[in-house]
Amino acid sequence: MSGDGNKKQFWKRNTAKVPGNIQHVYGAQHPPFDPLLHANLMKAGNKPLSTTTPGKPKKATTFQEFESITSDAWDVGDDDDELLAMAAQNLNIEVVMETANKVIENHSKLQERRQQQMEKMTEPEEKDREEAQEEEEEPDEEDEREEGAEMTTDLSFSLETLPLSDNRMVKSHSEAPVGSPKEVGVEQAALHRQQSLPHRPVIPLVARMADQNTSGTPAMTQREASRLDKFRQVLAGPNTDLEELRKLSWSGIPRQVRPITWKLLSGYLPANAERRESTLQRKRQEYFGFIEQYYDSRNDEHHQDTYRQIHIDIPRTNPLIPLFQQTSVQEIFERILFIWAIRHPASGYVQGINDLVTPFFVVYVFEYIEEEVENFNVSSLQEEVLRNIEADSFWCMSKLLDGIQDNYTFAQPGIQRKVKALEELVSRIDENVHRHMQQYEVEYLQFAFRWMNNLLMRELPLRCTIRLWDTYQAEPEGFSHFHLYVCAAFLVRWRKEILDEKDFQGLMILLQNLPTMHWGNEEVSVLLAEAYRLKFAFADAPNHYKR
């Protein structure tokens, strides 16, 4: 009877868990679990649990074992710290670290070569800087203490602060040491965090989102200026030719006209120029009417679980970019996601949807500023401008999700179908890669679920996502259909690295941490061209998927 009671309590304890909601996922912008960062947690997790009455530990039931294995995919009630403690108990840390370090070493070779080239180029400049610094007076100890405190609390990722972390990126500002007494302590703490992460070259801020240019070429070439003129000509007419606009947008949209172009291609704005202003006013008023009507209900019993999950996920959204750590920005995201969830009860809020707001928000902020957006303080904008950005982001995200909502309904059937289609497609276009993953028992769902759920946003830098979405907006059914071929091209892009891995752990670490941080427009354009070739070959002949 006691055993039956325990089983009932076990299932009762989990009745609130809703399938289809997934745990926070990690990727290029969200580094994976780092044992060094959570050493104290692991030590605590390895200690035996204290009990009031010592005795023989209870043997886990089959259902309990299954639940412990799948809780990271279905459980919305556990916190990240609990999952980390479970990982510390169930995994042999030495084996994991040995495997991870091996793979990380292989993956970082290319980045290290790039870094060495950059150092050779900047060596003469550094020598001149050192000579100039020797002539200056040495700052006293109090100044050094103030500088250390400034660097730990400042949210800026300016190039002047990059040497603090030895040219490595800190995972999150929330993890940066606050109030360190000396600069040396700051350096050691930053280096300690990065010991188990792949070395990635530092990208100038202007290249992250604003210019989307990693090659060091001028901000606008003659060809780019010509393309911008073509966009402006198409947009200047009384009735915008949407087909012509899609053709121009497929190969990328200039930053200056991207906000209006996205609004037109998503269907948020009409093609008729005279109707646009009235449409914007009406839709913005409608959105804030939803806020007044529904937002106060976020703490009601019926909606508090939804709001709680949104509130937890928002700080995790792009933690490396200071813009998204501002309180006002996080409040905007909370309102957008909560209102969308209330208006779409079939799916509600699912983790991963929070990422889909960020490209729209960044693009519509660019509409009102000229400087870089990563460190921009949105409180400097007028309240009316912020309200416009919020409403426009909500409606455009809603338009996107309308086409892929089956990705987020119960059990997420849309993602299941797309992952299966990806497996069949890869088996046709690259049999060696497909067989290699079969040989080491890697299931496509284990890595491609995130690709579909987050539209590759966790695999690519945000600047690349924005460029990718230019084409998705221009392509018919870009988010729902063309994305499949982009994922196939993306997987095959890493063919050599995949075939070099000879075990399950190595393959999973690679596929969940693909080295794309240095990517820019050129790499995305090649990826899209290959995806279009696959679509041309397979889209009109779906039976070609199968043998």
Image (cartoon, rainbow, N blue to C red):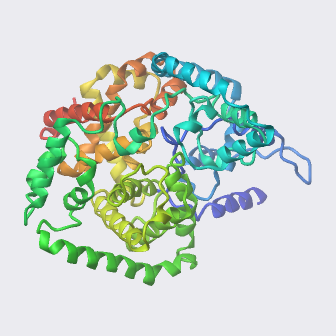
Q: Residue at x 71, y 46 (%)?
A: 149
In front here: 74 or 396?
396
Q: Name the side, left or right, on which 384 lies relative to 55.
A: left
Horizontal and vertical percent position of residue 398: 32, 64
Q: Quadrant of residue 263?
A: bottom left
Q: Is residue 446 above or below residue 77?
A: above
Q: Residue at x 57, y 54 (%)?
A: 75
Q: Name the side, left or right, on which 193 lies relative to 286.
A: right
Q: Name the side, left or right, on which 438 lies relative to 379.
A: left
Q: Is residue 439 above or below residue 531?
A: above
Q: Is residue 436 above or below residue 415?
A: above
Horizontal and vertical percent position of residue 61: 67, 47
In front here: 143 or 488?
143
Can residue 496 be seen from the camera position used here? yes
Horizontal and vertical percent position of residue 484: 28, 41
Q: Name the side, left or right, on which 400 lies relative to 139.
A: left
Look at the image and tell me in which quarter the C terminus lies: top left
Q: Residue at x 45, y 36 (%)?
A: 204
**Exactly how many numbered labels are in the figure?**
0
In front here: 143 or 316?
143
Can residue 22 be seen from the camera position used here? no
Horizontal and vertical percent position of residue 413: 36, 53
Look at the image and tell me in which quarter the N terminus lies: bottom right
In front here: 442 or 386?
386
